[in-house]
Image: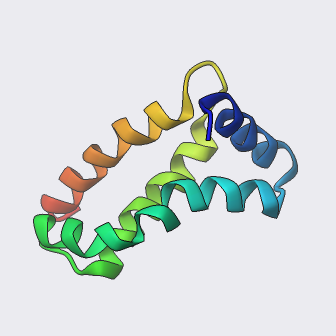
Amino acid sequence: MRKEQLNSEVLKYQESRSESAFRVVYDYFITRNDRKFKTIGKSIGADYYEARAIYEDTLLSCIESYNGEHDFERLFNASVPLQRRYFLRGG
């Protein structure tokens, strides 16, 4: 998926709360990475479900804060390590 298309889907979801737009974004960031959450969880002392929840919460937070000026994927990819560190600290 092209970055412009992904950015457009995020903005579309923000405006209309379209389930189809959300599904595109969710699938891109969460569903396609589903197999990695067990390994990610081990690396931060979490289980599969906690790791997945970190990524889902980060996605929702990024969607709400996205203003369209920059690349959404970059925002998400910068936010995930921060949330993983927060989890490691017991946040």
**Residue that sits furthest to the front in the current view:** 1
Query: Residue 14 occupies which quadrant of the picture?
Result: top right
Q: Quadrant of the N terminus?
A: top right
Q: Quadrant of the C terminus?
A: bottom left
In the image, what residue occupies the spot 38% across and 40% down? Answer: 77
Query: Residue 52 occupies which quadrant of the picture?
Result: bottom left
In the image, what residue occupies the spot 69% across and 42% down? Answer: 10
Is 12 left, or right, of 72 in this rendering?
right
Query: Residue 24 occupies which quadrant of the picture?
Result: bottom right
In the image, what residue occupies the spot 56% across and 21% down? Answer: 70
Pick the residue in front: 35 or 8: 35
The type of colouring in the image is rainbow
Is 10 left, or right, of 33 in this rendering?
right
**Residue that sits furthest to the right in the current view:** 16
Q: Is residue 15 above or below residue 3?
A: below
Q: Residue 7: horizontal and vertical position, in percent?
A: 66, 34
Is 16 left, or right, of 53 in this rendering?
right
Disc count in the image?
A: 0
Pick the residue in front: 9 or 17: 9
Q: Is residue 50 above or below residue 6?
A: below
Q: Residue 20: horizontal and vertical position, in percent?
A: 80, 60
Pick the residue in front: 57 or 25: 25
Q: Residue 5: horizontal and vertical position, in percent?
A: 71, 35
